[in-house]
Image (cartoon, helix red, strand yellow):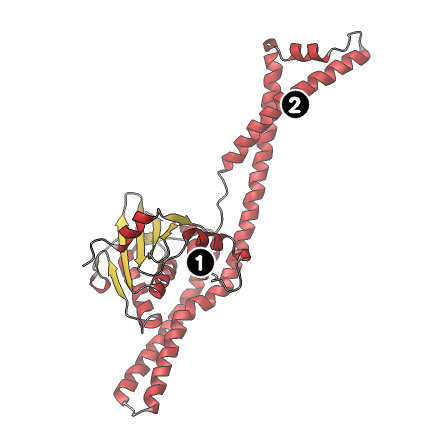
Amino acid sequence: MRSASLSAKIMEKQHPLRLEILRRPPSPWLYTSMGFFLGALSGMVLGYPLFIVVSTIHVYLYGDIPLDLGRSLRQGLAWDNWPVMAFYLLSGGAFGAMLGNIYQRLLAHRLRLEHLHQEFELQVAAMRHHYKNLVIGIEGFANRIKRKMVGSPNMAALEQDVNILHDTVQRLNETLGKELIFLKALTSDLLSPQPYDFYPVLKTSIDELLQLRFREKSINMEINGRPWEECQDSLIFNFEPVSMVVILQNILSNAMKYGDYIQISIVELPYSIKIAVTDNGPGFEVEALRKQIQAPKDRKETDSTQLGLKVTLHLLEKCGGRLFAASQPEAGSTFTLEFPK
């Protein structure tokens, strides 16, 4: 009997680290306020003294006043000249704020172009990724049929396999129909969530993975401390079901691939829903994973592309969700999905 959950043991060793597809730009007001501050400082330190120097030289050249830059600067910086100093301060600040805002817009456009480029690559690669489970399932059933035909034929078992193969093909056709919805969700700026019950979507995602991709692997899976088949809970909140299945299967498939005991916990908070998926796999370095996701161009050819996580992060960004990861080598891992209510 386990004295503590896998998730609790992992959380004790490491604080969850948020994963993101790209580094988020700072707040738009950051560059504007920094521009205002630097502009105001430049106006006071450079602009106004330069004006005094130029004015003094001009008067010296065209007037009878002797050249004394030190005296002119002391008189110009006296407190009785505060209106002129305030004018230069505000003028420099306004100019700096304008430049900061322009820089922020250029940075936002550059990041948007990077997002569009990555989304285009994901659209091409996602076709193969989404059908991988179904293709593996069909191939497995076909191999079973071939083996039974070579040996002593058992027509009842053969007919059962053929029926399963037929159902799998139908499921593939349904998935092809959903692919357009997924591509639309992937390329649009925002998803269109509606109220749905989360648990049936979760159980469907688990069942598809266990019946197709991980049919030959023994996996013990729990939802909120109970076997997943026995879960009858209900939780309704706004989400887009096709995208939710993609997100869940991407996270669950990684857990099933590396572990054989998986705990799923769903917590409803006042303003969000948290879904934690914990496995007893070998674990990994979270910081290395984040660098790999954010800088895919620097990876070696032998490294994983992390396509599933990239798709998940794109979809989460569109629905306002977040993804956190906590893990250590040889200590399992926990991926936590957070959705707004």
* Amino acid type at image mark 2: Leu
Visible in this render: residue 176?
no
Please rate how many residues cluster around mark 1, counting C-alpha atoms within 10 Å: few if below 14, some from 14 to 19, many from 20: many
Q: Give the label, 2 or 1, closer to the camera.
A: 2
User: Is 70 placed above or below 168 here?
Assistant: above
Which residue is outermost to the bottom? Answer: 152
Chain-order first, disc 2 or disc 1: 2
Q: Position of residue 193 (x, y in %)?
A: 37, 53
User: Is 117 placed above or below 150 here?
Assistant: above
Visible in this render: residue 261?
yes
What secondary structure is found at the residue carrying circle 2? Answer: helix
User: Is 98 placed above or below 12 here?
Assistant: above
- Closer to us: 223 or 164: 223
Q: Which quadrant of the view contains residue 45?
A: top right
Side of 168 relative to 229 (left or right): right
Side of 333 relative to 27 (left or right): left
- Closer to us: 27 or 289: 289
Q: Position of residue 16 (x, y in %)?
A: 36, 48
Please rate how many residues cluster around mark 2, counting C-alpha atoms within 10 Å: few if below 14, some from 14 to 19, many from 20: some
Cα separation between marks 2 and 1: 50 Å
| Quarter of the figure with the N terminus | bottom left
Residue 311's tag is 1
* Amino acid type at image mark 1: Val
Which residue is outermost to the left? Answer: 1
Which residue is outermost to the top? Answer: 64
Q: Position of residue 136 (x, y in %)?
A: 39, 74
Q: Which residue is drawn at the image coordinates 62% and 15% (left, top)? A: 84
Name the residue tied to disc 2. Answer: 46
Q: Which residue is drawn at the image coordinates 32% and 83% (left, top)? A: 162
Side of 91 relative to 138 (left or right): right
Residue 259's tag is none
